[in-house]
Image (spheres, rainbow, N blue to C red):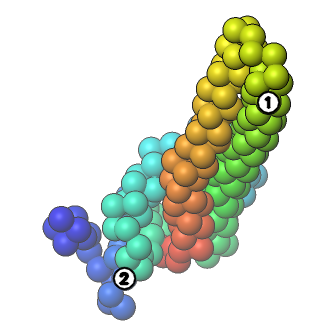
């Protein structure tokens, strides 16, 4: 399945896949809401950023470069600003993914700690119940045991399920931010 997808892309003379972007003007590559902001701090046009991101995901690990075709090729200084803003934007996106990953790991650790505390309480109530053999203590012990396992399971699931996609996103944005950008 990977071969037909990659065959949709043109290759550079050195074999890298070309992710082609075509626009009338350089301004079309930027969000229109922050016209007064410096190029390095401007957000890229959502469609442009999403296209690049989807393309890099699609070629999954193949070496690539981004080729931007504008009606009037930009001067070297302007082209350098565009490259800088692309790098800046995708490093920013990477940092957002890093934050999400940290938040998920923090939530996982908190759930794990809560689960351990509840499990400890359940064991203590069970030991106390063996002495007193009361229905309410037994009910409390079983309820605490279920709550502990739910918390521990959620902690494990949060870590195992959400960690990998965020890690892939971090690598994806890093590779885009470090990619070569050429103009034609």
Identified at 72% across, 42% down, the residue is: 112
Residue 31, given in percent of the width and then of the height, sits at: 58, 41
Residue 33, given in percent of the width and then of the height, sits at: 64, 34
Figure quadrant of residue 15? bottom left
- Is residue 160 visible in the rendered image? The answer is yes
- Decide: few, some or many residues near mark 2? Use Cα within 10 Å; few <14, some 14-19, many ≥20: some
Residue lying farthest to the bottom in this orientation: 14
Find numbered disc 2 in the image and state the secondary structure of the residue it sits on: loop
Count of all numbered marks drawn on residues in the image: 2
Identified at 76% across, 40% down, the residue is: 116
In the picture, the disc for residue 178 is: none
Figure quadrant of residue 83? bottom right
Instruction: Give the residue at mark 1.
Output: 127
Instruction: Give the residue at mark 2.
Output: 16
- Camera-side residue of 175 and 85: 175
Q: Mark 2 and mark 1: span between their CA atoms?
A: 66 Å
Residue 167, given in percent of the width and then of the height, sits at: 57, 59
Comes first in the chain, label 2 or label 1: 2
Q: Quadrant of the N terminus?
A: bottom left
- Camera-side residue of 38 and 85: 85
* Drawn side of residue 114 relative to residue 76, left or right: right
């Amino acid at each position: 399945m990977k071969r037909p997808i990659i065959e949709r892309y043109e290759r550079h003379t050195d074999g890298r896949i070309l992710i082609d972007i075509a626009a009338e003007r350089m301004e079309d590559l930027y969000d229109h809401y922050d016209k007064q902001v410096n190029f390095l701090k401007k957000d890229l046009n959502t469609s442009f950023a999403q296209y690049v991101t989807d393309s890099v995901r699609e070629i999954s690990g193949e070496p690539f470069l981004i080729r931007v075709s504008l009606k009037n090729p930009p001067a070297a200084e302007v082209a350098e600003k565009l490259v800088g803003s692309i790098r800046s934007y995708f490093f920013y996106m990477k940092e957002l993914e890093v934050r999400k990953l940290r938040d998920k790991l923090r939530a996982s650790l908190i759930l794990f700690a809560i689960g351990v505390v509840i499990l400890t309480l359940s064991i203590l109530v069970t030991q106390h119940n063996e002495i007193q053999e009361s229905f309410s203590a037994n009910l409390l012990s079983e309820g605490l045991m279920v709550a502990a396992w739910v918390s521990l399971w959620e902690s494990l699931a949060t870590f195992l399920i959400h960690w990998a996609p965020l890690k892939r996103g971090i690598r994806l944005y890093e590779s885009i931010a470090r990619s070569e950008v050429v103009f034609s």
